[in-house]
Image: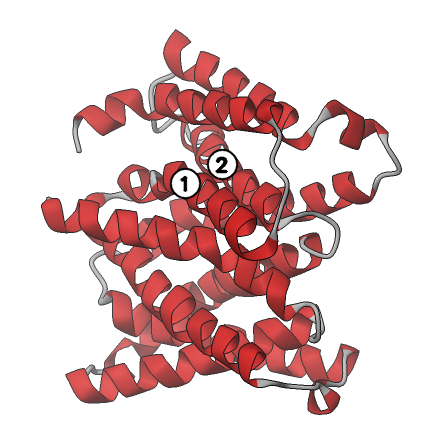
């Protein structure tokens, strides 16, 4: 159990800080190209890991449909939604929007699938989560010229579909090897993103320097390869609700990394909004967390 909590904290820090890495890379790289390079680096790291650990990749090829679903929902659309959102909003604000995932997970599992019990506590938590997100975004931004709202809608849409992915994952593949699973769907996602990069952008004309390269390596190896293996390890070994608690940590680490590395500005209202969001998520997951 301590291992699961340690992995959870590390994952929250790595994924929360990843928004700052994306924002940094977008200064010189197109959004699709950046995500394609990220996927390519992650795929190489995962394949090397599989070779070292002698993982049986061919024996898991029969799950191709599940891997395709994970690639589309958990890689391609999510990464592109994040990248395009960061052209309009700060890394800190984008990181807070990941709180949509546990909120959407509750809506899917309790209100749609009827797999979880609906109580006053978790309904109140859902409402608090929505109010908290509005405070973080800011009423003035919502009513302004629309650029901030557009960025927020990009990232919210991405994480709603990622929540669907989190619910489907243990149903489509139960007890699978997280390294093998991650290698397959990152590989499929990589192919899709590389093709998209050459169709819609000019990746070969991108100007690279040592800072971009280091950021992409950290992004691909640590945040992507390591992060996704850790997330699906938690999904398989601790369940969807425990794994989704990483979204308690990501807004905190995401805000901190944005302020420290990118000079993002954070208001008192946004800090209060983050607190309201986290309390709302806790109320939704309270009964589940007691079992963790």
Quarter of the rendering occupied by the N terminus: top left
Identified at 13% across, 51% down, the residue is 3
Q: Which residue is mark 1?
A: 247
- Is residue 226 visible to us here? yes
Give yes or no for contact between labels 2 and 1 (Cβ–Cβ under 8 Å): yes
> In the image as oriented, which residue stretches furthest toward the right?
145
Q: For mark 2, give the secondary structure.
A: helix
Left or right, 134 with reference to 239: right
User: Where in the figure is residue 86, as x and y percent of width and height?
Assistant: 67, 54
Q: Is residue 187 above or below residue 229?
A: below
User: Where in the figure is residue 198, as x and y percent of width and height?
Assistant: 72, 85
Tag shown at residue 147: none
Q: Is residue 253 above or below residue 215?
A: above
Quarter of the rendering occupied by the C terminus: top left
Identified at 64% across, 40% down, the residue is 265
Q: Which residue is mark 2?
A: 99
User: Where in the figure is residue 70, as x and y percent of width and height?
Assistant: 45, 61
Gap between marks 2 and 1 measured at Cα: 6 Å
- Is residue 73 visible to us here? no
Q: What is the image's colouring?
A: secondary structure
Q: Is residue 193 above or below residue 96?
A: below
């Amino acid at each position: 159990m301590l291992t699961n909590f340690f992995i959870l904290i590390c994952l929250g820090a790595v994924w929360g800080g990843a928004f700052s890495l994306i924002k940094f890379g977008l200064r010189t790289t197109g959004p699709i190209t950046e995500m394609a390079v990220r996927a390519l680096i992650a795929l190489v790291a995962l394949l090397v890991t599989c070779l070292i650990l002698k993982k049986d990749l061919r024996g898991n090829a029969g799950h191709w449909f599940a891997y395709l679903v994970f690639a589309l929902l958990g890689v391609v659309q999510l990464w592109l939604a994040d990248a395009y959102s960061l052209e309009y909003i700060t890394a800190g604000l984008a990181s807070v929007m990941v709180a949509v995932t546990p909120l959407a997970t509750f809506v899917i599992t309790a209100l749609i699938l009827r797999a979880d019990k609906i109580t006053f506590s978790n309904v109140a938590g859902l409402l608090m989560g929505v109010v908290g997100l509005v405070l973080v975004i800011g009423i003035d931004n919502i009513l302004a010229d629309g650029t901030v709202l557009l960025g927020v809608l990009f990232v919210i849409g991405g994480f709603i579909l990622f929540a669907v992915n989190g619910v489907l994952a243990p149903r489509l593949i139960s007890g699978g090897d997280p390294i093998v699973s991650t290698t397959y769907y990152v590989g499929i996602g990589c192919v899709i993103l590389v093709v998209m990069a050459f169709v819609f952008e000019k990746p070969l004309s991108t100007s690279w320097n040592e800072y971009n390269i280091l950021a992409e390596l950290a992004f691909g190896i640590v945040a992507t390869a390591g992060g996704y293996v850790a997330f699906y390890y938690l999904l398989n070994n601790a369940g969807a609700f425990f794994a989704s608690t990483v979204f308690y940590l990501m807004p905190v680490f995401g805000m901190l990394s944005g302020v420290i590395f990118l000079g993002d500005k954070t208001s008192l209202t946004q800090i209060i909004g983050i607190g309201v969001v986290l309390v709302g998520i806790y109320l939704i997951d309270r009964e589940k967390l007691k079992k963790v």
